Amino acid sequence: MIRMKGVTVPVVTPFTADEAVDTEVLANLVDYLIENGIDSVYPNGTTGEMLKLTVDERKLVAKTCIDASNGRIPVFVQVGAPTLRDTLELAEHAIDIGAAGIGVVTPQFFGVNHREMVNFYVSVAKAVPSDFPVYLYNIPQCAGNDLTPAAVNEILAAAGNVVGIKYSYPDFIRFNQYLACGNGDFDVIVGPDKLFLPGLAIGCVGVVSGCSQCHPYPFVEVYRRFMAGDMKGAQEAQRQAVELADIVKAGANMGYFKAALEYHGVGVSHMRAPALDITAEEKKELFAALDEYHRKWD
C-alpha cells in the first residue's frame, strides 16, 4: 500500500465565473504543488468545498487531479458524502481512475451513534479491495459528529485496510489517543496547519494542510528538516508556516486561498455561492501581506 506522509495538500476546487469546475486552473495547481515538493494531493475535502459539489463534479475533480499528477505523486481522494450510497460510488470511481487511496469524512450534520459510525466505515472499507488504503477523517467542529478512539479500534478490528486518520481538531490528548489505536501500524495525520511540527514530534506522520497550497515551501521544509534531525531548522520553518496561515486566514475563508494562488500565478478562480470571492480591497491587502511575507522570509 502507498501511505500518506509528509505534506499532503487538500486542494481547493477552482470555479469559473459562472461556477463551473475550472479544470485548467486545477491542473495548473497540481503542477505547481508538485514542482514545489509536496508529497501528495487530497481533492474533494473540506478545503475543496466538497458539500457544494455534485457526485459527478467530485468525479471530475478527482480525475483532473490524477490526470495532472500523471503518476508523479499519489492522489488520495476524499470520498465521504452525506449518504453511504454516494460514498461507495465515489470510492469505486477513485479506484477506477487510479487513486492511491481514499479519505472518508465522518457523516455530517445529522447525528450518528457509535454503532452507526462503525457500520459506516466498515461498510466502505469492505466495499474496496482489501489492499486499498482507507483513511478516516474526523473534523467534528464542521461535521457535527466525532469519531472516538473506541470506534476507531472497533473499525480497525473489522477492516484491515483502514490505515490511518486525518484529525482536524486541535486536541493533543485525542491525537495521542489515536496514536495508541490499533497494533502500532495506524498512521495519524495532522489537520491543523499550525500544529504540523508538534504533531510530528509526538509521532504523527504528516499533515493535510490547506494553507500549504498558498506557499508550499515552509511546510515542505518542516518535514524535510524534521526527518533530517534538524529541529532548529524545523522550528524556523514552522514559524514561517504559522505566519503564512495567519495571512491566508487558516482556512476560515477559501476565497483567501484562491486569491493567494492567483498571486502565485496558478490562475484566477472563484468561489461558489453562497460563498463570495474576497473583495478587491481584501485582495489588495492580501497581496501586500504576501509581498511583505516573501521579503521577510525568501
Image (spheres, rainbow, N blue to C red):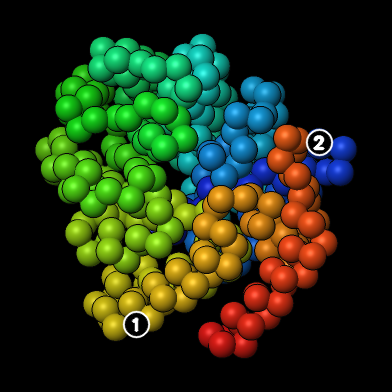
Q: Separation of disc 2 and disc 1 at Cα? A: 42 Å
- From the viewer's perspective, tell me whether residue 6 is left or right of residue 56: left
Residue positioned 76% across, 50% down in the render: 277
Say which amino acid is labelled 1. Gly
Q: Secondary structure at mark 2?
A: loop
Q: Secondary structure at mark 1?
A: helix
Residue 166: percent from the left, percent from the top?
36, 43
* Earlier sequence position, callout 2 versus callout 1: 2
Residue 260: percent from the left, percent from the top?
68, 63
Q: Are marks 2 and 1 in contact (CB under 8 Å)?
A: no
- From the viewer's perspective, tell me whether residue 192 is left or right of residue 21: left
Residue 63: percent from the left, percent from the top?
65, 36
Residue 103 occupies quadrant? top left
Q: Residue furthest right?
A: 18
Say which amino acid is labelled 2. Ala
Residue positioned 67% across, 29% down in the render: 53
Q: Which residue is mark 1?
A: 233
Residue positioned 30% across, 15% down in the render: 113
Q: Nearer the viewer, residue 120 or 95?
A: 120
Q: Is residue 148 above or below residue 188?
A: above
Residue 21 occupies quadrant? top right
Residue positioned 34% across, 82% down in the render: 233
Q: Which residue is mark 2?
A: 20
Q: Quadrant of the C terminus?
A: bottom right
Q: Is residue 271 above or below residue 298?
A: above
Q: Can residue 31 be seen from the camera position used here?
A: no
Q: Check disc 2: other Cα within 10 Å, few if <14, some if 14-19, many if 20+.
A: few
